[in-house]
Image (cartoon, rainbow, N blue to C red):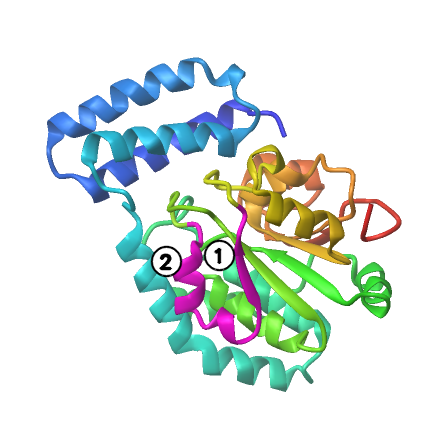
Amino acid sequence: MKIFPDCLLCMLRQVVEASRMAAEEHEVHEKIMDDSLKIISEYKKYRCSPDLCRVLHQAVKKHTGVADPYMHIKERDIKAALDLYPQLKRFLEKKGNSLYWALKTAGTGNIIDSALYNNVNMENCVKEELEREFSICDMEIFEKCLKAAKRILIIGDNAGETVFDRILAEHLQEFEIIYAVRSEPIINDVTLSDAYASGLDNCTKIVSTGCNVPGAVLEECSTEFTEIFHNADIVISKGLGNHETLSDQDRGIFFLLKAKCPVIAQKLGVALNDYVFKFNGNTAAKN
C-alpha cells in the first residue's frame, strides 16, 4: 500500500512521542527530529508506511540507546487487558459463545494502539466498543473456509490486544492455531515476550515473522514464517500495519481491524473507526 501525506504526519507524531518516552534531553529530541525530517523527505523510496516507520524508529533507538521505548506502555496494556480477561470471557458467554462475537472481541482489542492513541483508558473503551458490530463482516466466507481448515495463522499487531486475540484463539481450539509476532520491538507491536506474557502460549504456537517492520513484509520474513503463511488453511491479519503490508498479496487473507486511519477507512469503504472483518476477495483461503 502506497504512502499518503497523512501517513507522514502520523508517523512524525509517533516519533515525537517515542523520543519523549525514551529520553528527557531536548538535545536528543532535536537530533531525532533532524534525522526524521531527512528520512521523511525521501519517503517515496519506501515501499509502504510500516517500512518507513521502521527507519524512523531506528533513529529514536540510535539517539537514545533505548531498544524498546514502548516497553512500559506494553507492560501496562497487557496487565490491563489481563485484568479484563474474565470480563471478556463473560461477554462472550453472554453472546452465546458465537464465532461472530469471538471475532469482534479480537477486533475490539485493536483499540489499544499507542501508535495512534496515548494513555487509553482500556476498561471504559472496552465497555463501549465490545457491543459495536462490524461494518463489514465476511462471516459466511469464513465459516465456509473453516469447514475444510486444520491450521489457522493469526498475525498479531499490538501488544495489549493479544489478550483479546487469546479469546478468539481459545474459541477456535479445535484447530491448530499459530500466532505470529514481530522479531524485535517496534512501536508497541507484539514480540515473543509480549505474547507469552498474555498467555497465548496456552492456546497457540507462537512464532516470529522474522521481520522487524510494524507489519509483515513477506520479502523480509523468515523461511519458517513464509512457509506457514503460504500453507496455512486460513490467515487472519490483525490491525492496520499488517493490512498495509499484506493487502496486495494474492492469497486469501481475512483482515480483522478497526479502521482508525482515515486513509485505510476510505480504502475499505467504511467510516472512520468502524470495525472490519474482510476477506481480500479471493475465492479460497489458500493460494
The disc, 1 or 2, on the residue closer to the chain's N-terminal end is 1
Q: Secondary structure at mark 1?
A: helix
Please tell me how many numbered marks the rendered image carries.
2
Task: Give the residue type at disc 2.
Answer: Val
**Residue 45, above or below 265:** above
CB atoms at circles 1 and 2 under 8 Å apart? yes
Query: In this rendering, would 161 be left or right of 12?
Result: right
**Residue 266, above or below 9:** below
x, y (%) of residue 162?
49, 63
Residue displayed at 62% across by 37% down: 218
Residue displayed at 41% across by 44% down: 115
x, y (%) of residue 172?
68, 74
| Residue position for label 2 | 120
Q: Which mark is residue 174?
A: none
The front one of 194 and 223 is 223
Query: In this rendering, would 202 be left or right of 152?
Result: left
Task: Tell me if mark 1 has few (under 14), some (14-19) or many (20+) residues whose alpha carbon lies within 10 angstroms of its own.
Answer: many
**Residue 119, above or below 243:** below
Is 200 included in the stretch rendered in magenta? Answer: yes
Q: Secondary structure at mark 2?
A: loop
x, y (%) of residue 257?
60, 53
Q: Residue furthest front?
A: 223
The front one of 23 and 173 is 173
Q: CA distance from mark 1 to mark 2?
A: 8 Å
Residue displayed at 34% across by 32% down: 58
| Residue position for label 1 | 111
